[in-house]
Amino acid sequence: MTSCLLSWHGSIIARRGLALYLASLSDVIAGRADPVSPAADDGLFDIVPVEPSLARPVYALRAGSLFLTAAPDYRFGTASQIQAWEQFVALPMACLPALQRLISRPWHVAGPDFVCVRPVIQDLELRAGELSVPLKRLDIQPREDGSGLVSDGQGGSVELDPCPVPALQALLEEVQRVVRRGDPEPAIRIRDSYSGLQAEAFKVTLYPEDLARLRYLVLICVDCGELALAERALELARRADDGPDMLYFSAILAMRCGRHQQAADLLRDALLRRFPNSNVLQRTQDLDARLRHGENTLFLLPDRLRHLHLPPFDELFDRVLMPMPLSEKDGQDIRQAYGHRFEDTSVHLATDSREALLLLDRRFNGDSYWNALCKGHQFWLAGDTDAADQHYAAAKILAIRTGLMPIHYNCGVFTWLGGAARHGVPAPVADRLGMGAWHWESSTAPDGPPPALCLVFGCDAGYFRFLPKLLLSLLKLCATRPDPSFRIRLCLGIDSPTPEQLAFMRELIDAVSQQDFGLDVTLAHGRLTWRDAATYTAIRYLMLPEVVRRYACPVITADCNGYFPDDFLTLFDDLRNTADYGFRLYAYNHEGRQTFGEPWGFGAGISWFGEADRLPEIAAFLHDYLQVAYDPANPTNWCIDQCALAQSFRRFVAPRWSNLRIGFMDEGTPLMVMPHHVGGKDELLRRDGTVSMQDVRAFFSRP
């Protein structure tokens, strides 16, 4: 037999006895299938020429009025007419091995673009990339080096090189040597280890035609400290994809390897390709000059692109930057950007990976605020609070000495008092923040029991804009309370209120004194010694000792930028019946252990203190902590209220966790509607309608 019948989809008609079936090329080549010859003479069917004049004729197989149909899933059917799937080309048996070799593996199209193809048989054609060759004219010329030329006999051809290409084969052999050598320092592997390198290289051997996936091998090579290997892999990956992101990746890796001139050239090309119609080169000219001078300015590029309202490059390779050796030439802005990226990276790593990050960064860059700070977090979460406090103290000193600021959520390190706060703040405590000189004014409450609840808020003249909405919601729900004996005492401290604001508050005090709304109001106002975003958030704790001295009842402290839902009283009843304390414990599990974050990662937005007899001691601690921890010489005192609250929790609540009922204020229906519930502060002011001081006046002035 010299020829066989190949179907529209690349299967071959074969027989088993008198039965017909569709066989694969490999089964026919191996002798496991008996192909039907175009010259076969069988009484059950006839082989009919469709195009007999061709070099390789096309046939149909007919039985009476029916024609054989070959479906793509190796199944037969019948049809009453000859169309595509009823046609079979007579292919010489000698062609099958070369054809099978082509379709059984991927190939690279010879040429500068390094295109990969996997030839297929479809529609009686061999398709290899952009070339489609009818099987009736197919010519395959194998070569000794494994490559081959595929042509159609009429000038169309494609030269195919086998996979993997020699450069990839050499790379894999080097990876093999590295893996066999073993990991000399497993303790500094952050995201991937040598086993990860082995696994990714194994994937490459399975898909050698997919050079783009080598970028993942590059990342693991960097993680394993194999930078030269990473560069070779990235160079190969760019043969398959040399777009702007891959150029950016190459720039990052070149900078990481200390070749700043090359990094600048690659970045320039990446910017030109990504933003061809912009003036981005002119607007990043300073970064280019500094990069060529030896500074690691790629740390500044993301912010620059955001400033220019340009989309960022793919962030896949940004992990190559963390950690890396900083240059002595790096400016303060680069060190600051590195520090923030380091802190953010550390947060998202598991404990062992974070430790590896710290070890490697310290090897590269020595002492730094970011390393000491994140090391403190390691000890804190492990329960070694003494060691954590030592590192936080070191981080504060290093930050101030170098003029670098921690990322916003780590700024609590400046006001973290450490272990000394566990046993209280040593007396005497001076009134450094000036709260002692404030004026106190209160509404007259009906004779009877003390209030069931004190709500304590603090703000300054700017944040006063949130108070009308808060006050109106509170007035409405208290006025309709089902229990006439239930009263709430609102205690509000305002730093430097305007005359209009002070007059409004006095009108409110007069109104609730003359008419029983179920709400009583205490106002404290004056001027703090230092006025900033840290001090006005601390007012509620600074005034708390005086509040609990006056009113012996449970307390809720909260941010003033919120308002009360209509079912607040029902929610509060549930809270006081089920919880002794309630905090925003987003970083804690229900066993009372902090599982992530920093010690001051303790939400101060709303807190419930249900043990009234304990409140004088807790209030005094909070007040004293703030007076001692606030330091105008600090770069910032932001998070001071969270530090104070976290330390009070650590001292008065955490040791009794198993004997107390602790409410997680972020779970269930919130007691107050706050910005993080509705998408921001401005949205909160608009939510359910804006409220002005005049709206509040209209409510308490109604008949």
Image (spheres, rainbow, N blue to C red):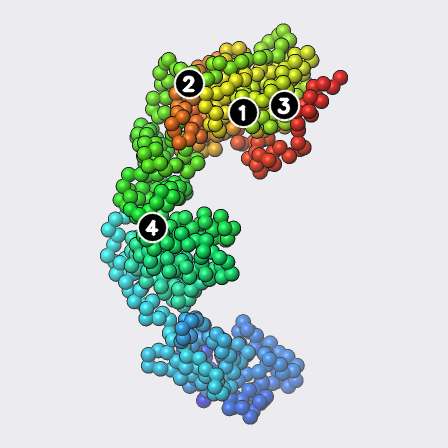
Residue 657 x/y as whole percent:
43, 23
Q: Secondary structure at mark 1?
A: strand
Question: Is residue 101 placed above or below 630 in the rendered structure?
Answer: below
Q: Which residue is mark 4?
A: 295
- Res. 620 image quadrant: top left
- Of the residues under marks 3 and 1, which one precedes in the sequence? 1
Q: Which residue is mark 3?
A: 471
Task: Choose mark 3 or mark 1, whichever is in front.
Answer: 1
Residue 449 is marked as none
- Of the residues under marks 2 and 4, which one precedes in the sequence? 4
Number of numbered tags placed on the structure image: 4
Q: Residue furthest bottom?
A: 53
Q: Secondary structure at mark 2?
A: loop
For the N terminus, which image quadrant?
bottom left
**CA gap, disc 2 and disc 4:** 44 Å
Q: Which residue is mark 2?
A: 432
Which residue sits at x=60%, y=25%? 467
Which residue sits at x=61%, y=85%? 63
Please name whichever residue, 287 or 34, is drawn nearer the observer in this view of the structure: 287
For the C terminus, which image quadrant?
top right
Residue 515 x/y as whole percent:
69, 13
Q: Secondary structure at mark 3?
A: helix
**CA gap, disc 3 and disc 4:** 54 Å
Residue 379 x/y as whole percent:
33, 33
